[in-house]
Image (spheres, rainbow, N blue to C red):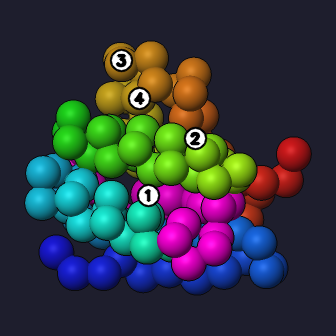
Amino acid sequence: MGDFPTRKIGSHVTVIQPKGQLNMAGASALRKQLQGIIDGGSNRIVVELSTTEFIDSSGLGALISGLKMARLAGGDLRIAAAPKQVCTVLELTNLNRVLPAYDSADVAFDD
């Protein structure tokens, strides 16, 4: 797993788009890249999941780890465009209460 694509929304939000499976290998890469984004000064992050086909406990752990890192840096992490499988896993684990899924990255920080 290499770097996942990133883009900016305005000057304050960074979007990262993991592709494929967020299993042990993908989760490790995501965690490292999220840390790099935060270390680079961006603390408002959207993980855009439209091209994520599968997520397991390692992937969920990476999202929670990223959420903690972002909040410790004074920001937040939000998820967007999550496929049905990912939403189902979030609901079954009750993580949808901590990480609600937004329709798109563009609206994740509209509040």
* x and y, in percent, of residue 94 in the image: 44, 17
User: Label 3: few (<14), some or many (≥20) within 10 Å?
Assistant: few
State which region is magenta: 38-55
Q: What is the number of the mark on residue 92?
A: 3
Give the residue at the far left of this rendering.
25
Q: Which residue is mark 1?
A: 49
Q: State if disc 4 and disc 3 touch (CB < 8 Å).
A: yes
> What is the quadrant of the N terminus in the image?
bottom left
Where does label 2 land, which residue?
101
First in residue order: circle 2 vs circle 1: 1
* Element type at mark 2: strand
Residue plotted at (63% across, 54% down): 73
Disc 2 to disc 4, how far (Cα)? 9 Å
Residue 95 percent coordinates (x, y): 46, 25
Q: Position of residue 22 (x, y in %)?
A: 23, 54
Rounded to the nearest angstrom, the CA distance separating label 3 from label 4 is 6 Å
Q: CA distance from mark 2 to mark 1?
A: 9 Å
C-alpha span from label 1 to label 4 = 13 Å
Image mark for residue 90: 4
Question: How many circles with numbers are drawn on the protein?
Answer: 4
Seen in the picture, residue 65 relative to 17 is either above or below; the reply is above
Disc 3 to disc 1, C-alpha distance: 18 Å
Please identify the quadrant where the C terminus is shown: top right
**Marker disc for residue 3:** none
Q: Are marks 2 and 1 in contact (CB under 8 Å)?
A: yes
Do callouts 2 and 3 mark residues in contact (Cβ within 8 Å)? no
Dot 2 or dot 4: first in sequence order is 4
Residue at position x 43%, y 64% in the image: 34
* N-term-proximal mark, 2 vs 3: 3
